[in-house]
Image: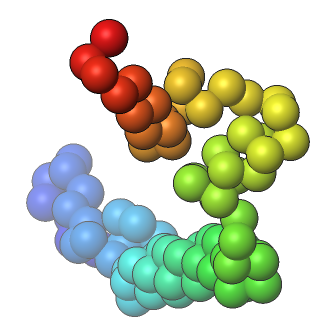
Amino acid sequence: METRGEEVHLDKTEARAGATPGVVRYVLLIGLILAIAALSLIWIVPATQAPKDTGGAADTRRAVEQGDANPQTQPGMQSPPPPAPPGGH
């Protein structure tokens, strides 16, 4: 601390009443890494344990087979058109 007349001059450390070691950036970085790891585990573990015949077209196929859905209203599940009758009628 330096006094010039009635003015008091402090350096940065004295004005803050402590040091600034930069620990906060490490706490934030570690917290970010832990959050990414936790969310990845929450997503990846159930995905690896899910049956292979679930999701997307498998669910649509199952719904059509059980009669819960009409195949004509399901994208990608339309039945081919019936063959044309013989004789062109």
Instruction: Give the residue drawn at x 54%, y 31%.
Output: 74
Instruction: Give the residue drawn at x 57%, y 54%.
Output: 57
Q: Is residue 2 above or below residue 84?
A: below
Left or right side of 29 for 35: right
Image coordinates for residue 36, horizontal then vertical, percent: 54, 76
Instruction: Give the residue drawn at x 40%, y 33%.
Output: 83
Q: Is residue 60 above or below residue 1?
A: above
Image coordinates for residue 50, horizontal then vertical, percent: 76, 77
Quarter holding residue 82 = top left
Q: Residue furthest front?
A: 87
Residue 25 visible in rendering: yes
Left or right side of 18 for 89: left
Camera-nearest residue between 84 and 64: 84
Instruction: Give the residue drawn at x 67%, y 50%.
Output: 61
Camera-nearest residue between 13 and 77: 77
Image coordinates for residue 80, horizontal then vertical, percent: 42, 38
> Where is the N terminus found, in terms of image quarters?
bottom left
Camera-nearest residue between 11 and 83: 83
Image coordinates for residue 21, horizontal then vertical, percent: 40, 88
Quarter holding residue 12 = bottom left
